[in-house]
């Protein structure tokens, strides 16, 4: 590679920018609460919307818990009322049977009294007493038997009435408690339904907030990349301007350098064009090789090979390996030389360090890249030899000076 512009730096920068958009989640069956929108302009807005919806969900969860507790209490009260109604119905039935039994016993006693002679027998029994006291005792005994039976019947009937009233009250209470239980169940179901519809909206709002935040972070990253790219581009322009100025100075100062024994065009020494090409050839032999190799590429001037030879190694005066690995008089990369090598001195082998092989290979390489097709093709061929515009300008400038 050329040593004339050592230290010049070329920087290539590739930048890319993208646009990330966050679409709001699809609408659900349930409407959004009033004043709440999941399409937020900033991540802060999106997070605030999600937090507001979270508060609503928490409130609904509290309502669900209360409604569930109310329903459980109403269910227990209804069960207790139904049990009480059943007990009251049972007690009412027992009281009715007791009253019926009491009436049956009274009837039985009255029938027995009637069969024994009825009131006449009772009166006869009283009149048959030995004394008034005995007669009164007999009357009181009959009254006690009949009165006791009647009291029992009355008490049984009263107890039966109370039991029926209790059963009626218990039935009414059970109906009311069942109605309350049903209402509490409906209320709990409605609140739970609201909560079930709010939870997916909360999930969507949280996801949207995350998407908006990710979009903002990506936008910030893109802005940072663009700022870095702009700064790098500015540095590149400065370096390119400096490199271009250096090229201009080098081109202005560049003069064709002729080795001893080889003069400028038109001089007596200029006619020495021998085809010597051994590995130990001196600078004068290089010009003979330039003249000999150029005709192998119709349209290629020997001056171009001479200019490249001067830029690369000073016509073989410095053939050390470059930092990039280029070697020999014409500074080929070994891999490139292996693909296009030409046996310039006809010794049956190709050697990257051999001037004849190197110069004839350079002519072949330039020709393959269009060097003989005209000015545009020549510039392209030189650029392919060394990918730098300043290199093309320098080689063409030196070649023109060799001609003139």
Image (spheres, rainbow, N blue to C red):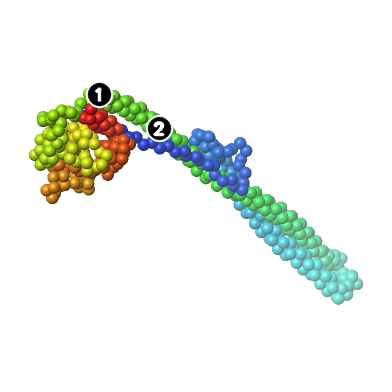
User: Could you tell me residue 79's position as x and y percent?
Assistant: 65, 56
Residue at x 48% of width, y 41% of height = 211
Look at the numbered disc 1 and give the secondary structure of its residue.
helix
Q: Name the quadrant containing residue 285.
A: top left
User: Could you tell me residue 199's position as x and y percent?
Assistant: 55, 46
Left or right? Give the position of 284 relative to 77: left
Judge by depth and name the residue closer to the eye, 239 or 133: 239
Q: Name the quadrant containing residue 267.
A: top left
Q: Which residue is mark 2?
A: 226
Disc 1 or disc 2, which is closer to the eye?
1
Q: CA distance from mark 1 to mark 2?
A: 38 Å
Res. 5 in view: no
Q: Quick one: quadrant of the C terminus?
A: top left
Judge by depth and name the residue closer to the eye, 88 or 37: 37
Callouts 1 and 2 close, C-beta under 8 Å: no
Residue lying furthest right in this view?
Answer: 120
Q: Quick one: quadrant of the N terminus?
A: top left
**In the image, which disc is placed on residue 252?**
1
Residue at x 55% of width, y 47% of height = 200
Residue lying furthest left in this view?
Answer: 280
Q: How busy is the neighbourhood of tag 2: few (under 14 within 10 Å), some, or many (20 plus)?
A: some
**Which numbered disc flags the more N-terminal residue, 1 or 2?**
2
Left or right? Give the position of 165 relative to 74: right
User: Could you tell me residue 368's position as x and y percent?
Assistant: 27, 44
Res. 104 in view: yes
Residue at x 53% of width, y 39% of height = 50
Q: How many marks?
A: 2
Left or right? Give the position of 381 relative to 222: left
**In the image, which disc is placed on residue 146?**
none
Above/below status of 303 relative to 119: above
Q: How busy is the neighbourhood of tag 1: few (under 14 within 10 Å), some, or many (20 plus)?
A: few
Residue at x 52% of width, y 37% of height = 46
């Amino acid at each position: 590679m050329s040593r004339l512009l050592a230290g010049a730096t070329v920087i290539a920068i590739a930048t890319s920018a993208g646009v990330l958009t966050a679409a709001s989640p699809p609408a659900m069956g349930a409407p959004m609460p009033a004043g709440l929108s999941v399409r937020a302009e900033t991540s802060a807005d999106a997070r605030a919307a999600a937090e507001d919806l979270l508060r609503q969900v928490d409130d609904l969860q509290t309502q669900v818990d209360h409604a569930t507790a109310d329903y459980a209490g109403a269910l227990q009260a209804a069960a207790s009322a139904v049990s009480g109604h059943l007990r009251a119905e049972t007690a009412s039935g027992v009281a009715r049977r007791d009253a019926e039994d009491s009436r049956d016993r009274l009837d039985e006693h009255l029938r027995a009294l009637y069969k024994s002679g009825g009131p006449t027998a009772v009166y006869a029994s009283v009149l048959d007493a030995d004394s008034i006291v005995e007669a009164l005792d007999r009357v009181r005994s009959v009254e006690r038997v009949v009165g006791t039976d009647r009291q029992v019947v009355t008490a049984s009937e009263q107890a039966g009435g109370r039991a029926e009233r209790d059963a009626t009250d218990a039935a009414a209470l059970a109906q009311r408690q069942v109605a309350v239980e049903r209402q509490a169940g409906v209320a709990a179901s409605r609140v739970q339904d609201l909560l079930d519809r709010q939870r997916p909206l909360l999930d969507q709002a949280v996801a949207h907030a995350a998407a908006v935040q990710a979009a903002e972070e990506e936008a910030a990253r893109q802005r940072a990349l663009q700022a870095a790219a702009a700064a790098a581009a500015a540095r590149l322009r400065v370096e390119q301007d400096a490199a271009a100025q250096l090229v201009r100075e080098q081109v202005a100062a560049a003069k064709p350098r002729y080795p001893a024994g080889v003069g400028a065009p038109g001089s007596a020494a200029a006619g020495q064009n021998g085809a010597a090409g051994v590995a130990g050839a001196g600078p004068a032999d290089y010009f003979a090789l330039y003249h000999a190799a150029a005709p192998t590429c119709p349209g290629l001037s020997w001056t171009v090979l001479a200019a490249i030879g001067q830029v690369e190694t000073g016509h073989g005066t410095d053939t050390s390996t470059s930092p990039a690995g280029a070697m020999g008089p014409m500074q080929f990369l070994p891999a490139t030389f292996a693909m296009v090598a030409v046996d310039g001195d006809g010794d049956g082998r190709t050697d990257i360090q051999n001037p004849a092989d190197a110069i004839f290979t350079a002519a072949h390489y330039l020709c393959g890249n269009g060097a003989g097709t005209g000015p545009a093709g020549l510039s392209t061929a030189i650029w392919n030899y060394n990918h730098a515009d300043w290199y093309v300008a320098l080689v063409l400038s030196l070649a023109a000076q060799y001609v003139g």
